[in-house]
Image (cartoon, rainbow, N blue to C red):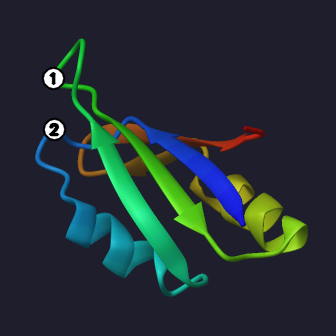
Amino acid sequence: MKKIMLTGLSPEVTEESVRVSLEKLGPVRSVSIIRDGDARSPVVVVLMDISDEQAFSLISRVTDYWHDGHMINARLLLH
């Protein structure tokens, strides 16, 4: 299981929208949206049942991706 952190998403992001987008790449176990701090910059943590290679591919494809007026970044969390 891989834990991926996404930043730069729209403040209107929902757990369902993240799940639908990422399920195309692999099974999504859970989606948590953290809105503490700057509400305009939520942090999304996703648990996915994917391999190391799939996680690297996902992060490579999503990082520095411009979407809906925001620069999205993805990081693989080790814990």
Q: Residue furthest left?
A: 12
Q: Quadrant of the C terminus?
A: top right
Residue underneath mark 2: 11
Give the answer, above or below, for where 70 lies relative to 60: above
Compared across the picture, whether 33 is left or right of 66 comes to left
Q: Residue furthest top?
A: 37
Expressed as whole percent of the image width and height from the top left, the position of residue 12 reads 11, 47
From the top left corner, tell me how far across and down residue 58 is, in percent. 67, 64
Q: Residue at x 73, y 55 (%)?
A: 60
Amino acid type of the residue tagged 2 in the rendering: Pro
Q: Nearer the viewer, residue 30 or 72?
A: 30
- Label 1: few (<14), some (14–19) or many (≥20) C-alpha neighbours in 10 Å: few
Q: Which mark is residue 79?
A: none
Q: Are marks 2 and 1 in contact (CB under 8 Å)?
A: yes
Which amino acid, by three-letter code, is at mark 1?
Ala
Mark 2 burial class by Cα count in 10 Å: few <14, some 14-19, many 20+:
few
User: Which residue occupies 23% across, 20% down?
Assistant: 36
Query: As drawn, is 15 to the left or to the right of 60?
Result: left
Figure check: 35 above or below 20 = above
Name the residue beneath numbered marker 1. Answer: 39
Q: Residue at x 72, y 67 (%)?
A: 1
Q: In the image, what residue occupies the spot 88% across and 70% down?
A: 53
Q: Earlier in the sequence, mark 2 or mark 1?
A: 2
Could you tell whether 73 is left or right of 79 in the image? left
Q: Quadrant of residue 34?
A: top left
The picture quadrant where one finds residue 18 is bottom left
Is 30 located above or below residue 60 in the figure? below
Give how far across and how far down residue 28 sits, in percent.
Answer: 50, 76
Task: Determine which quarter of the picture holds residue 41.
Answer: top left
